[in-house]
Image: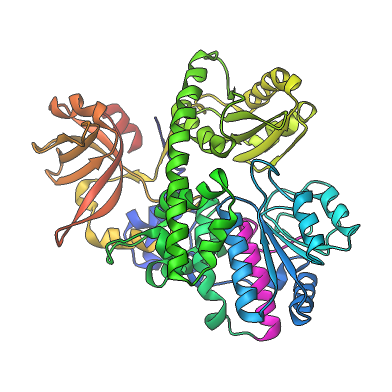
Amino acid sequence: MKWTFRPAAENSLVESLAQSLGIRPLTATLLTNRNIDSYEKAKAYFVDSKTTLHDPFLMKDMEKAVNQLETAVTDHKPIMVYGDYDVDGVCSVALLTDFLRQHFKSEITPYIPNRHTEGYGISKQGIDLAHKKGIGLIIALDCGITATEQVEYAKSMGIDFIICDHHLPKEQLPNALAILNPKKEDCHYPSKELCGCAIGFKLLQGLCLKRQINLEQHLLGYLDLVAVATCSDIVPLTGENRALVNRGLNRLNTNPRLGLKTLMGSKDETRIFHVDDVVFKLGPKINSVGRMSNALEAVELLSTQDPKLSERLYLKIRGYNQARKDILEEVMTEAKNQMSLQEASNFSNVLFSPNWHKGVIGIVAARCIEESYKPTIILTESEGKVTGSARSIEGVNIHQALQECAEHLEKFGGHKQAAGMTIEKGKLSAFQKAFDQAIGKQINNGLLELPIHIDCEVRLDQLTQSFLNIIERMRPFGPWNPEPMFVCHNLVNHGASRLVGKEKKHLKLNVRELETSTVMDGIGFGLGQHWELIKSGKPFSLCFHLKRNSFRGHTALELEVKDIRPFSPKEKALIL
């Protein structure tokens, strides 16, 4: 791992901020590292961004979309709510389906395409079903921004579209009634990085404002769905996204909807679900349905208020999730074997097998990055074509790389960090070479090494309960608002450090700082390989998050260690 320090602000700026807020310079450093360098920005970060929701009518086409939706619900016209099969799409469909049914008694047909037979985006099968059911309006969520042909096909049948999408638009937009997407060049909405579910929420917010429906009583209770979608889609947790996630997580931890409560399982009532819990525990369960079956079952779970139905659906989803895990391990083993045979000089991984399960290739791409830290595309065969999923690393725009290889692709779409594509079989080899060259243009020295971004160096005696309380107020953590990372040097084993876990892969640390004699405990998951250094008695450096560990009624500070290396006085001198 490569330890890198976030660019430090001028000492005078840190000191000025510390004085204006009445905080320690250490805390002021954390804030300036996040571009919070004034009293006004701090207020926006700690107060306004926790609660403030923008006026939805600031979004281009919102007036059109609300007027059209209001006409449809007032006239009791049937509506299709169409979404993607990932967490964002599932939560989006559940949100609009449940809200419009509950508050307007609307006739709603939820629809999510089958990943394996229809693929991503708007499908003709979905449009045909809408036509068969006499539906004249489709609301597309988390998809549709590139569906130019499909929208024209629907128009030929008398079906209109409202598109709520957050993916990058192309030059030609679909001829829809309204397109809600903050990334459109002519859209000046303040929050550019909303997920699809959040844009669907803004549409409902606009409808509520127009119909004078009380938001607090009738709409904000749906923010648990918006929070799950926002966290799972890995969008920046700044500005309005922070407000949506903060309120949504509060709902999730106090009074979640039945389906989410069932997925969360029985948990200690004092334990709080944070962003990571959503990303790594809730999200994969919801995603598994679309990967292994039809994601509409997940929509039904997130919409139902029937405890018996919720339990039946949960048991099915638990089965899908276990099947996904089993298939994932099998595909991952084969992908690792392919990676081991690739040229070390490659800038990317482009791996293919016609037998890999389409439902897990996105996860495999992400796992391969953990193994090799290279932009990765995992490809399989589907209906005579090669289809795949791409994931990128920090600093590499994978969508831009695909644009440079467009001549070898039948179609592609996505954003900087993730994308999907379809390729003709005969063009696969040419695409692999072209893609690796395109990635190579973006690679700088050291980029293909997993970075740890450190906020600052600390002494162990600076780590107090009150300091952790301030860190907790900086939540929710996520992209663009990372959890503070610290480094501490010149530590030694205080005597109680040991290997733990069934396979002794983890480190339970008990360390003492030589300069201050301060002693603290820590945990390093998967860091058992550093045991020889720890027990040698030689000094070392730790890179870590500061956590609160509660066990049997006792609460103490703990270091959640991310990396360990031998202490170098030269390195410390450079940092100071």
Q: Using the rendered view, name the quadrant where residue 239 is placed.
A: bottom right
Judging depth in this view, the residue of 243 and 203 nearest the camera is 203
Front in this rendered view, residue 204 or 571: 204
* Residue 363 visible in the picture: yes
Rendering colour mode: rainbow
Quarter of the picture holding the C terminus:
top left
Q: Is residue 180 left or right of residue 237?
A: right
At 77% from the left edge and 26% from the top edge, which residue is drawn? 408
Residue visible at 56% across and 33% down?
A: 357
Q: Is residue 199 shown in magenta?
A: yes
Q: Position of residue 546 (x, y in %)?
A: 29, 50
Q: Quadrant of the N terminus?
A: top left
Residue in the foreground of this view, choosing between 12 and 214? 214
Range covered by the magenta-colored residues: 187-212
Toward the right, the furthest residue is 156
For the point 34% across and 67% down, the residue is: 22
Residue 409: give x, y in percent of width and height.
Answer: 76, 30
Q: Is residue 2 left or right of residue 479?
A: left
| Residue 47 in the image, given as x and y percentages of width and height | 46, 71
Q: Is residue 193 above or below residue 423?
A: below
Q: Give the main secondary structure of the magenta stretch.
A: helix
